[in-house]
Image (cartoon, rainbow, N blue to C red):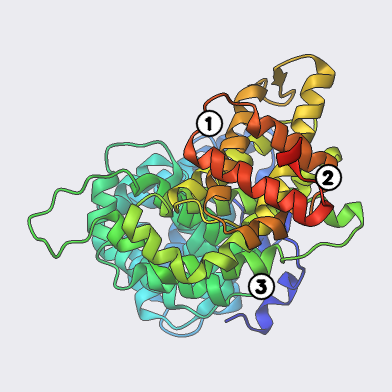
């Protein structure tokens, strides 16, 4: 999918400068130095200020005449985008961080103008700029309302999902993220029914991008956009008159999306790490991507038989992704002191696994045992059941988290056969395995699941270390 225009995106890490939802055209094929547009009004001579008042937009120093003449040139454009107009549009793109400029563009009907031009042109650079401008504008409520009420413009915008230009797709994802992410305003059903349901093969097109792009920047922005869409629409109870109309899970919970998320994860994160600590500890952008991966799967996995069908062919590969996310947490230097982000990772993996009926994975099981032990040791050492995350002052109930991990081990361990269970225990040492055994066995009236895990542990300990617990 990605072509030579994306040479600046070859790095395996996602550039942090791409993360801001109002990022400008700086990441595009060509950027313009426009810092002179941001001069403080206090720096301008009073006489000059008076002369400028008639032309400036609101409280900004941007020229309304410049905006109008640029729009007129844009409307009259019939061929390829020339350098002079491209430069003007890039400057216009920069100005759309200002609310007053956005309001002026809306009054001039910019969304309709852009929709008509995008639909009629094959100039990738022009489409990229126009989508980038709308993405900036969508950070303001008035723009989101107009987009929500314009099926024609949104139809043209969503059609760009078939573009092969990664820069166009990146701006499209920024636009969707900006338009969807903000506060709920009661228009969720309108967005869902009037735009996303009407976009033919929306999820299939989105999945193709995730599965085939080699741009980490695009994959990050795509995950952000998709997470925003899913989070906004997942709980909508669509009232439909026809049985053929699709609800959210019928539209989004599909095999192609599960497979695509896994492929995107492999591209951005990779499936293995070295022994060096710099390989083990994820970068800020990698951690953000892993969190988005878990959040998306938290939504997609919650629809019982539909979810089971969507995941069944990809479950082993999906569990490898979960195991990859857990690798840093098996190291004390990263796990402790426990923070709300690591707590969320463990709880999300537990919830996703439970929703998928607790499939057993040898690697994840042993990782969870190690994490449980690290938490228990630190908890006992500190003589405290609570931690407070210094960054967000969130009080973490350590006993509750420890019990969540134990329940995870019991449920998934119950679904293993003896051979699988023993293979997982081989990744541990005898002391740790005995510690877990004693904790699980510390129950006067254990349930059938716990009894099953106890017997598997006894058999594994005897098979690996020749210790017969039945004789003790």
Labels 3 & 2 near each other (Cβ < 8 A):
no
Compare marks 2 and 1 and give the one earlier in the sequence.
2
Q: Position of residue 468 (x, y in %)?
A: 77, 45
Q: Earlier in the sequence, mark 3 or mark 2?
A: 3
Against 14, residue 341 (above or below) is: above
Give the left or right position of residue 256, taking residue 23 as reference: left
Residue 222 visible to an observer of this rendering: yes
Q: Nearer the viewer, residue 321 or 4?
A: 321
User: Residue pushed farthest top?
Assistant: 383
Helix, strand or loop at disc 2? helix
Give the quarter of the image for residue 41: top right
The residue located at (61%, 53%) in the rendering is: 23
**Residue at which label 3 appears:** 29
Q: Residues within 10 Å of mark 1 (few under 14, many from 20)?
A: few
The residue positioned 53% from the left and 44% from the top of the image is: 411
**Residue 131 percent location from the top left of the image:** 47, 64
Q: Are marks 2 and 1 in contact (CB under 8 Å)?
A: no
Image position, residue 410 (x, y; %): 57, 42
Residue under numbered circle 2: 430
Q: Residue furthest front?
A: 471
Which numbered dot is residue 446?
1
Sooner in the amino-acid sequence: mark 3 or mark 1: 3
Badge 3, how many Cα within 10 Å: few under 14, some, many 20+?
few
Please state which of residues 229 and 316 is positioned toward the viewer in this rendering.
316
């Amino acid at each position: 999918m990605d072509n030579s225009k994306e040479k600046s995106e070859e790095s395996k890490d996602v550039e942090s400068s791409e993360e801001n939802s109002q990022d400008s055209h700086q990441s595009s094929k060509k950027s313009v130095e426009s810092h002179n547009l941001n001069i403080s009004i206090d720096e301008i001579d009073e006489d000059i200020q008076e002369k400028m008042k008639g032309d400036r937009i609101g409280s900004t120093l941007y020229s309304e005449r410049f905006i109008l003449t640029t729009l007129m040139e844009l409307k009259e454009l019939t061929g390829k985008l020339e350098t002079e107009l491209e430069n003007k549009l890039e400057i216009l793109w920069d100005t759309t961080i200002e609310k007053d400029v956005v309001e002026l563009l809306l009054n001039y009907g910019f969304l309709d103008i852009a929709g008509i031009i995008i639909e009629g042109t094959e100039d990738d650079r022009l489409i990229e700029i126009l989508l980038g401008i709308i993405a900036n504008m969508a950070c303001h409520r008035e723009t989101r309302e107009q987009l929500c009420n314009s099926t024609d413009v949104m139809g043209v915008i969503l059609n760009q999902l078939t573009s092969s230009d990664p820069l166009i797709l990146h701006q499209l994802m920024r636009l969707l993220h900006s338009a969807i992410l903000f506060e709920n305003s009661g228009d969720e059903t309108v967005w869902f029914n009037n735009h996303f349901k009407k976009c033919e093969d929306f999820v299939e097109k989105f999945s193709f991008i995730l599965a085939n792009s080699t741009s980490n920047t695009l994959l990050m922005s795509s995950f952000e956009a998709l997470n925003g869409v899913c989070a906004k629409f997942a709980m909508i109870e669509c009232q439909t008159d026809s049985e053929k109309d699709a609800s959210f899970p019928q539209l989004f919970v599909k095999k192609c999306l599960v497979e695509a998320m896994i492929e995107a994860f492999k591209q951005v994160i990779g499936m293995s790490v070295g022994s060096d600590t710099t390989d083990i500890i994820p970068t800020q952008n990698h951690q953000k991507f892993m969190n988005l991966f878990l959040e998306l799967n938290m939504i997609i996995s919650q629809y019982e038989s539909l979810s089971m069908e969507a995941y069944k062919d990809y479950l082993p590969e999906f569990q490898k992704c979960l195991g990859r996310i857990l690798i840093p947490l098996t190291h004390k230097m990263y796990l402790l002191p426990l923070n709300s982000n690591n707590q969320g990772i463990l709880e999300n993996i537990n919830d996703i696994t439970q929703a998928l009926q607790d499939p057993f994975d040898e690697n994840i099981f042993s990782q969870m045992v190690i994490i449980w032990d690290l938490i228990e040791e630190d908890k006992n050492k500190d003589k405290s059941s609570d931690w407070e995350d210094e960054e967000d002052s969130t009080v973490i109930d350590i006993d509750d988290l420890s019990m969540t991990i134990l329940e995870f081990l019991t449920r998934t361990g119950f679904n293993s056969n003896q051979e699988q269970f023993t293979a997982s225990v081989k990744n541990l040492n005898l002391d740790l395995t005995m510690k877990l055994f004693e904790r699980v066995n510390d129950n006067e009236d254990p349930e059938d699941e716990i009894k099953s895990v106890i017997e598997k542990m006894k058999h594994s300990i005897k098979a690996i270390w020749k210790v017969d617990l039945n004789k003790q």
